[in-house]
Image (cartoon, rainbow, N blue to C red):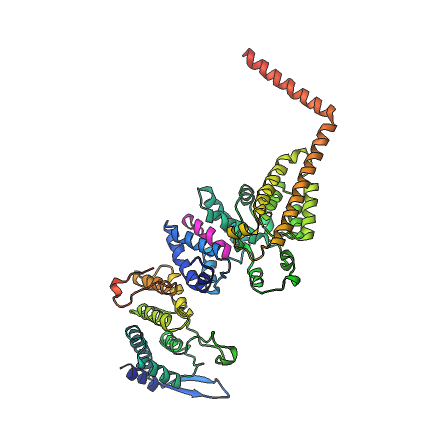
Amino acid sequence: MAKYGVAYSKEKAIWTLLPYAIRLSGGGQQRMIGAFSRTFRSNTSITKWNRIEPFITGLFDKPSIPSMDRAITLVSPYFHSFDQNTLAQWSMAALATLAVPYTEEVGQSVADTLWRITLDDALRQHIPVGIWLWSSKQTFILPAQCIPPERRVRATVRIPPTQRIPPARRWYQDPRGREAVRQFRALGDIEILKSYLLLVWLEWTPLEDSAFAEMRTSIREDFNGIGMGQHREDLRKRLDHVLGQLDRGPKYLMEQRPHPYISCGDTEITENQYWELKQLLLEVDREAMEILTRTPSRFTILFGILTSVDTYRISLDVHV
Amino acid sequence: MIQRILSGVLGSGRTRVSSTLNPSNTVITRGLEELAAVSATCCLRTFSYLAIMDPTSTVLRNVGKRYTGAFPFKTQSKNFPARHNFGALHSVFYPSHKHLPYYRQPHGPRPNVQWNDHKLSGDEHIMLLQLAQFKYRTGGCEKVPCWILRFALHYLSQDPPPPTSVIISCLSIIAIDLGCTVPATGLDERYVHV
């Protein structure tokens, strides 16, 4: 089943098994739904059988049952008709599943779904902060499953190397596009913006030029200043992590996650972009430090006050 | 025997081909609807058993020829009792033409078996399992036809679930498509070889 061709030709049979796997999952037996999730993650060519759509939609129509939380979380990457209600239902199920020790499949599924929802301009702002906070703490790899089907279909068409367009430009509605970055900036929540950047930087394909420029602007304008030190540190760590993976080359990346767009040229461009973002973060960090050191009088006063308070406390403790 | 049963189906059914109106209406003589329905069910049951016992039988081929001679490709059986069994028979004798080049495929919409309103009676699920095995072996592409998989999907999606024997049959259909060996002779001793 793990082989590309076999799974591709048997996708309907695998989809047919889903309702039974979900029923077992509701009864506490998680092995089949886990195997189902793993099969689909390792075979990115598998597309959804349209006959299964009513069943998946039906899962979200039912009242939320705790025993079904895990099943909903694992199936949600294949549900493409999210609205505010279903998003709320998914969020509750995902947060409940993430609250207990969970497997890698669950983490990947939440990441996949989150990625899909970021595609939708109307839904982006309704993603709960809890999900963003969770995603910002993960070092998972986004599987190619998160690539929309239309992008995958195009990948099967053989295009001469000279006519190839950078992948990000083929996809009009890119969650890593400039508009998406702008919208997240407009939300005005630095935690969400950081989580978004942490999520989208996990992709191994190059960023669109305008989105890249918007991210640079965001780092300069949103993440500057002394108070943003910890956020910059988190962003830098994520960039280090991804750069470390990109360093290992396309062969390693393909082993980790079969991806129709990874090529030597792509990884090189991505590496350069991420390296530039990292340098920019370091620069903003330096600037913040310079501002701190340029205002000795204020700093000295503040330090003096703090020291005196501490001394006072210490002295009190000693006397008591 | 199967030819006699098929004669019953054919005797009660009259095909009328008209170029101006609906091109292929199956007209059942008034009063013989029930007989046609029972005949179709019996025909399908006998065919499925024979297909498992002797898949290379010449009888199967003859029956196929007689059926396709009497019922054209576009025959619809939407409002007919036992339409599911008729649909199944039709799909057995008119296999999928997707593998053929476009110009060789029969024109017009292909009648599809819809299981949405199907109510299981008796051992129909075993018939479907046997047909799945037959089509998997003889279809040429080692695949269970989509309409049989849709049967499995329909019953596995039901809430409350169907009887255990039906679930076993549905899972066996999936197992056959995934390349497992499911013996269909001793149905009480069914097991799956991976």
Main SS of residues in magenta: helix
> Is residue A175 visible to us here?
no
Pick the front one: A271 or B83: A271
> Is residue A301 visible to us here?
yes
- Which residue is at a point 70% across and 38% down the rendered structure image? A283
Does the magenta segment cover residue A64?
yes
- Which residue is at a point 63% across and 47% down the rendered structure image? A271
Quarter of the rendering containing residue A150: bottom right
Q: Please indicate whether residue B24 sits to the left or right of residue A313 in the image.
A: left
Disc count in the image? 0
Image height of A286 relative to B80, above or below: above
On-image quarter of the C terminus of chain A: top right
In the rendered image, residue A48, in percent from the top left (x then y), is placed at 49, 61
Q: Please indicate whether residue A78 sits to the left or right of residue B66 in the image.
A: right
Q: Residue furthest top?
A: A319
Quarter of the rendering containing residue B30: bottom left
Does the magenta segment cover residue A255?
no
Pick the front one: A24 or A206: A206
Image height of A225 relative to B24, above or below: above
On-image quarter of the N terminus of chain A: bottom left
Pick the front one: A316 or A30: A30
In the rendered image, residue A124, in percent from the top left (x then y), is placed at 60, 51
Q: Please indicate whether residue A155 sits to the left or right of residue A94 in the image.
A: right
In the rendered image, residue B100, in percent from the top left (x then y), is placed at 48, 76
The residue range painted magenta reads A62-78
In the rendered image, residue A243, in percent from the top left (x then y), is placed at 60, 44
- Which residue is at a point 47% across and 88% down the rendered structure image? B18
